[in-house]
Image: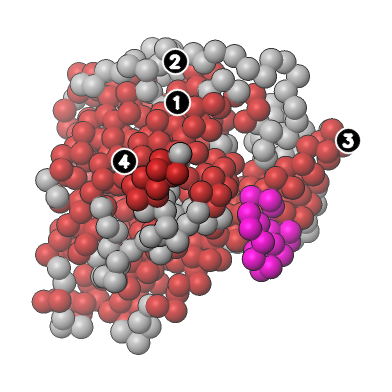
């Protein structure tokens, strides 16, 4: 047994990365709690009917979402050896759902086929070294801006998911897009759970209590379950939308029916790789594939930069050792997600919750992945942990990541302006890719305006050009008559 522990230590570099088995286990559990909502949310996003009237089905999507996330997360941990968990990407799945819903000629298998093609293209870019080269070409200060942007983004996700920050309805006739609670007033039991969890988590982290983030999540969940049992708060979303002070999506209550059951995995392999080319034509299908490709290409790059920096797993040049394996698993995430009809899987910013607990190796990912596989059989229990209980962890981790903002050279406007656009547009547009795109384009432009164009890496020119196409995809589709 000691020999096995020593071999595992060497393989995962546990001691070398300054971690312990207990930290890895706590980190893996914390990451799972922070990500488990996707098992419930993804089926809701992909619930619409396609051109043929076909539906993916809630239970089937939930089961395969957990399956694919579990297998890929374990692969990332066991092979790439990093604590970067994967699951269905929210940006891509929303794009996929909207595209299917608004296109009268496209079916779910055909759309998922395009996701598979985007993933295969990504895999080729990784194996040829192109994606790694792009990653290494990004200036150090811009990588720091990505970390800060991820921190702001993850904090905003937590605040919005908890209902502490809310969208202001358009009928309010105001230019302010978001506000505090309800008209500037904090109301409702879910908000109380969030505030309790946030204060407790901050106190535990400040006091350097081991497992502070995980303790905060568990304590807030217990409080939420008690409140729901007594006050019967209910969900905030429903047929009539008449309960705005309810829980955000996940109601923390023990399931009344069976807690366990065999998962329905019939969606696996239900995909038509080239079907969309026949339904939409080659041009439209290629444009859709290109849009998906750009999104997963840069979302993952930004996320892993932020997480690796937070975990202090980068070298003195800001690069991630063995990054090729991370990128290969990420590319396989798009292929596997499309083949399973649950949309592209990618590295999750919520992995920061585990990193905040001390996770530094792939052991944490194996714990997270195993929990996802177990979740296939216990889907009702996934609904036990509400957003409001997890959100405090995201806010605290966001703070930890934003604290690196001092590493940016604010005296050099050639990097300061792109950095500013990078970390502000990520939360403001709710997209990592948008922030990266604005920052990369601005870097090329400002350096050129400064007369320092020779300092720009050739790949940065190429990436900036790709983002120009990414942002202009709408006009391009209209010009080609495929929008």
Residue 271 vs residue 156: left or right? left
State yes or no: discs 2 and 1 in contact (Cβ < 8 Å): yes
Residue 206 in magenta? yes
**Spot occupied by residue 410 in the image (x, y as percentages of width and height):** 38, 83
Precedes in sequence: disc 4 or disc 1: 1
Q: Which residues are the magenta region?
A: 198-216
Residue 319 vs residue 48: left or right? left
Could you tell me which secondary element the residue under label 4 belongs to? helix
Could you tell me which secondary element the residue under label 2 belongs to? loop
Q: CA distance from mark 3 to mark 1?
A: 34 Å
Q: CA distance from mark 3 to mark 4?
A: 46 Å
| Residue toward you, 78 or 463 | 78
Per the image, the residue denoted by label 1 is 67
Q: How many residues crowd mark 3 within 10 Å: few (<14), some (14–19), many (20+)?
A: few
Q: Relative to 371, does residue 154 appear above or below in the rendering? A: below
The mark lying in front, picked from 3 and 4, is 4
Q: Main secondary structure of the magenta part?
A: helix
The dot on residue 311 is none
Q: Relative to 469, does residue 242 appear above or below in the rendering? A: above
Precedes in sequence: disc 3 or disc 1: 1
Q: CA distance from mark 2 to mark 4?
A: 25 Å
Residue 477 in magenta? no
The dot on residue 79 is 4
| Residue toward you, 56 or 465 | 56
Could you tell me which secondary element the residue under label 3 belongs to? helix
Per the image, the residue denoted by label 3 is 230
Per the image, the residue denoted by label 2 is 265
Tell me, yes or no, if residue 426 can be seen here.
no
**Spot occupied by residue 79 in the image (x, y as percentages of width and height):** 31, 41
State yes or no: discs 2 and 4 in contact (Cβ < 8 Å): no
| Residue toward you, 262 or 483 | 262
* Residue at point 41%, 40% (across, down): 4
């Amino acid at each position: 047994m000691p020999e096995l522990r020593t071999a595992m230590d060497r393989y995962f570099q546990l001691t070398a990365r300054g971690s312990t088995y207990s930290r890895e286990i706590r980190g893996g559990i914390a990451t799972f709690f922070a990500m488990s909502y996707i098992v419930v949310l993804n089926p809701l996003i992909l619930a619409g009917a396609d051109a043929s009237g076909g539906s993916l089905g809630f239970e089937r999507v939930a089961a395969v979402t957990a399956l694919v996330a579990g297998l890929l997360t374990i692969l990332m941990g066991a092979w790439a050896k990093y604590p970067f968990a994967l699951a269905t990407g929210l940006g891509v799945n929303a794009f996929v759902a909207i595209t299917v819903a608004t296109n009268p000629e496209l079916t779910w298998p055909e759309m998922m086929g395009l996701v598979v093609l985007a993933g295969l293209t990504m895999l080729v870019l990784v194996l040829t070294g192109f994606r790694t080269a792009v990653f290494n070409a990004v200036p150090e200060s811009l990588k720091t801006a990505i970390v800060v942007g991820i921190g702001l983004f993850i904090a905003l996700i937590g605040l919005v998911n908890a209902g502490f920050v809310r969208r202001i309805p358009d009928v309010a006739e105001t230019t302010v897009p978001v506000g505090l609670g309800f008209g500037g007033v904090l109301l409702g039991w879910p908000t109380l759970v969030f505030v309790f969890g946030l204060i407790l988590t901050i106190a535990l982290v400040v006091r350097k209590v081991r497992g502070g983030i995980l303790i905060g999540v568990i304590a807030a969940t217990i409080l939420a379950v008690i409140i729901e049992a007594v006050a019967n708060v209910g969900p905030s979303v429903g047929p009539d939308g008449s309960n705005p002070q309810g829980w955000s999506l996940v109601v923390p209550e023990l399931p009344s029916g069976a807690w366990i059951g065999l998962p329905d995995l019939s969606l696996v392999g239900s995909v038509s790789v080239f079907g969309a080319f026949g339904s939409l034509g080659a041009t439209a299908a290629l444009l859709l594939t290109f849009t998906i490709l750009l999104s997963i290409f840069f979302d993952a790059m930004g996320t892993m930069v932020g997480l690796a920096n937070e975990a202090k797993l980068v070298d003195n040049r800001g690069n991630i050792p063995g990054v090729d394996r991370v990128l290969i698993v990420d590319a396989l995430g798009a292929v596997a997600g499309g083949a399973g009809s649950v949309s592209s899987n990618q590295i999750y910013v919520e992995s920061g919750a585990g990193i905040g607990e001390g996770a530094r190796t792939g052991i944490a990912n194996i714990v997270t992945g195993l929990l996802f596989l177990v979740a296939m059989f216990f889907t009702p229990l996934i609904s036990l942990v509400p957003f409001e209980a997890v959100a405090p962890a995201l806010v605290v981790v966001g703070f930890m990541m934003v604290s690196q903002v001092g590493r940016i050279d604010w005296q050099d406007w050639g990097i300061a302006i792109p950095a500013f656009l990078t970390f502000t547009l990520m939360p403001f547009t709710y997209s990592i890719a948008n922030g990266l795109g604005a920052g990369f384009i601005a870097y090329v432009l400002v350096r050129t305006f400064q007369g320092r164009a020779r300092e720009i890496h050739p790949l940065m020119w190429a990436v900036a050009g790709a983002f120009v196409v990414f942002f202009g995809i709408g006009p391009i589709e209209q010009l080609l008559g495929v929008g």
